[in-house]
Amino acid sequence: QQGGISINDYMNAQYYGDIGVGTPPQKVSVIFDTGSSNLWVPTKNKFLQRHHLYKHSKSSTYEKNGTVFAIQYGSGAVKGQFSKDDISIGPFTVKGYTFAEVDNTGGMGPAYYLAKFDGILGLGWDSIVVGGGPTVFNQLVEQGQLDEPVFAFYLTGRDGKVGELVLGGVDPDHYTGNFDTIPLTSETYWQVELTGVTIGGKPLSNTNKAIIDSGTSLLAGPKSEVKKIAAAVGAKPMFAGEYSIDCDAANASAIVFELNGHKYELEVQDYILNTGGACLFAMMGIDIPSPAGPLWILGDVFMRKYYVKFDYGSKSVGIARAK
C-alpha cells in the first residue's frame, strides 16, 4: 500500500503534518524530520501555548514504560518519558510503538510558543534513535505495510499551499525526469558524499559529507565555507551565523552542490528568502564537530527545488527536479 500525508507550509520555515496517537487516535501535528529518528509528542501546554496534546489516560491501547527521555536538537532540547501506544500515520497504523511523551519543552525556548507543529517524527535511521528501538518507518517496513520501502517529500514553496509526504512510493505528479540515485555513506542521517560546492566553476568547499534534512529550513555548512559563499553572492553577515541579502540581487550567481558527481544548481530565486520586505540568504554557518561533522545540511531550500525519494531498501536517495 501507499499513503499520502498532507504537509502544510508555514512561511517556508515550518513543514508539518498530522498523525494520530492512541486509540481512538488523538491528532498531533509533527515535523517529519529526516535529520532525527525519535517520535515525541507533548503532554502539556505552558501558559498561552495552544499545542495539540496526547493524554494517555484517553487511550485504550496505552502501555506504560516510564524510562526517562531527553533529546537535543539544533533548535533546543525536550524532556519526558517513554511510553507505548498505537501510532496512525496516513492510512497506516504501527501498533505498540515506543515513543516519548514530552512534558518539558522549555529547552525549545520561545519559538515553540509560535510553532505550528506540536511534536517531531524522526525519519532518520535506527542507529540515531535516542533510547534505542526502531523508527516508525522501520516498523512500517518490517510489518509489510508498504508497497516499497521508500518515502518521498514534495515541499511547496508557497506559504499556505499543501505539499505531500508519500509513504511506500513516490508521486509522479510532483517530479519531472528521472531520479539520480545517490548511495548513502552512512546509515545515521540520510548522508551522501559531497563532491563539491561551486559558484561559476570555482570550488568553495573542502567538506565531503552532506545530509538531506527535511527538519532544517535553510542550507547550512561550515562557517568558513559559508562566509566565502556569502561574499561571492553579496550576502552580509547578521547574527547567529545568518546573512542578509539584497532582495533585488537578481544578478547573483547560481550555487552548485555536487553530490556523488551529480550537480544540483540553486539559483538566486532559490536562495533568497523574502521575510516581509527584508531578505535572508538561505544559508547559515554551523560548525558540527567530528565525528558527525564537518558536514553540509541540505534542508528545505534544497528540497523545494528537488523532489527527494528516501530509499530505505537500497540505502540511497533519489533526486529529481520537483514540479
Image: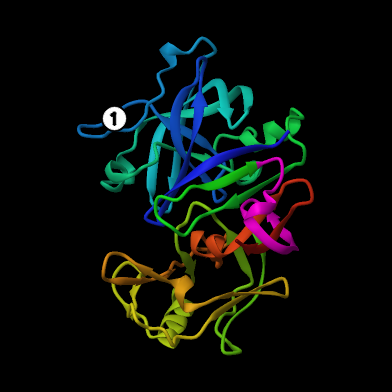
Tag 1: residue type? Asn
Residue extent of the magenta highlight: 167-190
Q: Residue at x 50, y 20 (%)?
A: 25
User: Which residue is depicted at the point 48% across and 67% down?
Assistant: 220
Inspect the magenta stretch and tell me whether residue 180 lies in it.
Answer: yes
Could you say where residue 14 lies in the image, as x and y percent from the top left?
41, 50
Q: Residue furthest left?
A: 47
Image vertical order of residue 19 relative to residue 313, above or below: above
Quarter of the image with the C terminus is bottom right
129 with respect to 279 (left or right): right
Question: Does 237 appear in magenta?
Answer: no
Residue 242 seen in render: yes
Residue at 75% in and 31% down: 142
Circle 1 residues within 10 Å: few <14, some 14–19, many ≥20: some
Q: Which residue is mark 1?
A: 45
Quadrant, the N terminus: top right
Q: Nearer the viewer, residue 288 or 135?
A: 135
